[in-house]
Amino acid sequence: MKAVPFASLLCLALAVGGCGGQTIVSTKPMATSNASHLVEEALGRARPQIDVPNRPPPRKPVVKDLVVGSGAGVKPGDLLTIEYFGIRYTGGEFSNSWDNGEPFKFRLGSNDPEVSPGWEKGLVGMKVGGRRELILPPELLYHGSAPSDLRPDDAVIYEIDLLEAE
């Protein structure tokens, strides 16, 4: 099979992404860990590609399974290991776990200040091996004040891979 140059693939991705909205494509390499490698193989790609819709952000959270995992759905009290990629609804990446070199772990329902209320609600029921998109309005993004990388009126889109749940 003949190799396709990266520049050709990037041009194709940009051309396709130009139809119907802004596309955020990450080209940074993924940190290697056993769990994230397994999900990467299952999903067929390392990092998400997020299409920003050509409409105003929703006023209520939107939860969509892009890939349904297997097993029981997670519930409050479970310890989750995830990879996530987040962009502002207006475009532009603001946070992701891949650049940290390891997945993010937290206990669902613990009201951890590092975990948005939108994750606490939007990840319930997700299954290991799945990828879920969350579109969150500003009021579900943080506990207290906005982080420095977001404005208080920013809506965001996350794609989250659930690697493990205990």
Image (cartoon, helix red, strand yellow):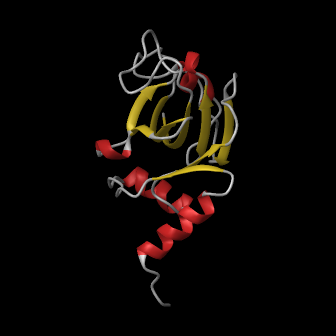
- Residue drawn at x 68%, y 31% is 56
Q: Toward the viewer: 158 or 163?
A: 158
Which percent across, then down, holds residue 159?
A: 54, 42
113 relative to 18 in the view: left or right: left
Q: What residue is shown at x 46% (from left), y 39% (from top)?
A: 82
- Depth check: 128 or 17 in front? 17
Q: Among all residues in the image, which is located at the extreme left?
A: 101
- x, y percent for residue 137: 61, 23
Q: Is residue 50 above or below residue 43?
A: above
* Above or below, comparing residue 117 to residue 165 in the picture: above
Query: Above or below — where is 6 with respect to 84?
Result: below
The image shows residue 80 at horizontal and vertical percentages of 47, 33
Q: What percent of the width, then of the height, locates residue 14?
A: 54, 62
Judged from this view, the residue extending furthest toward the top is 144
Q: Residue at x 42, y 51 (%)?
A: 36
The residue positioned 42% from the left and 73% from the top of the image is 6
Classify residue 128 by image quadrant: top right
Q: Please determine whether, in this image, residue 16 is positioned above or below residue 63.
A: below
Between 43 and 1, which is closer to the camera in this rendering?
1
Residue 17 figure quarter: bottom right
